[in-house]
Image (tube, rainbow, N blue to C red):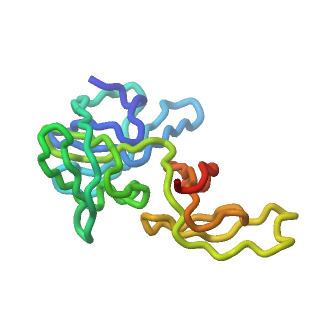
Amino acid sequence: MLSVTELRKGAVFVDQGRPYVVQEYNHIKVGRGNATIKVKARDIKSGSMLEKSFVSGATVEEGEIEKKKAQFLYSDAGAVYFMDPGSFEQISIARSLAQDVVKFLREGSEANLVMFQGQPIGVEIPLKVELKVVETPPGEKGDTKQGGTKEATLETGFKIQVPLFMKPGEIVQVSTETGEYAGRVGAVK
């Protein structure tokens, strides 16, 4: 059993025989009464979203999840495709379950598939990834006084703001939590 106060984003629980993955968690304390835990969760089997409220101190059945190493292959409009590096088995996951991370994945990127009863329910990637800048306008002379930024397109097609000195071909670190520039790694060798 799992206390409802331990439900955080990505946690899996079973309620009335249906498995859910938490998308949002709110702990609400009003006056002298008990706290209320509100979660927005996605039904793993149907994909539908649901809001549930629990009284503090309640418990739910914990969903057993496992993590499986995988290598990103490609994505299309409906799914994201990975390969198990051990068995070379191809695994697909609905694009809606990987929407937040697909913009950081390039061919061959390593990831962890989050599995529930043999079914992929999510994708975990590192907190920072290194991607190549493929397109960005040249920095204007004199623009550096304010430490300005400009838009850059990365090799995955994702666009971020980078410092004015960045040029196409350079490698940048990107935070996968915020989607923002996290540092310069250098140029492609």
**What residue is at 34 percent from the left and 37 percent from the top?**
11
Where residue 107 appears, x then y in whole percent?
Answer: 32, 57
**What residue is at 48 percent from the left and 48 percent from the top?**
129
Front-lying residue, 77 or 87: 87
Q: Is residue 81 left or right of residue 105?
A: left
Q: Quadrant of residue 112?
A: top left
The residue furthest front is: 189
Classify the position of the N terminus by image quarter. Answer: top left
Front-lying residue, 71 or 10: 71
Measured along the vertical axis of the image, is residue 27 above or below residue 83?
A: above
Where residue 109 appears, x then y in whole percent?
Answer: 35, 49
Q: Quadrant of residue 74?
A: bottom left
Front-lying residue, 29 or 20: 20
**What residue is at 68 percent from the left and 70 percent from the top?**
150
Where residue 154 appears, x then y in whole percent?
Answer: 50, 65
Where residue 184 appears, x then y in whole percent?
Answer: 63, 51
Measured along the vertical axis of the image, is residue 7 above or below residue 40?
A: above
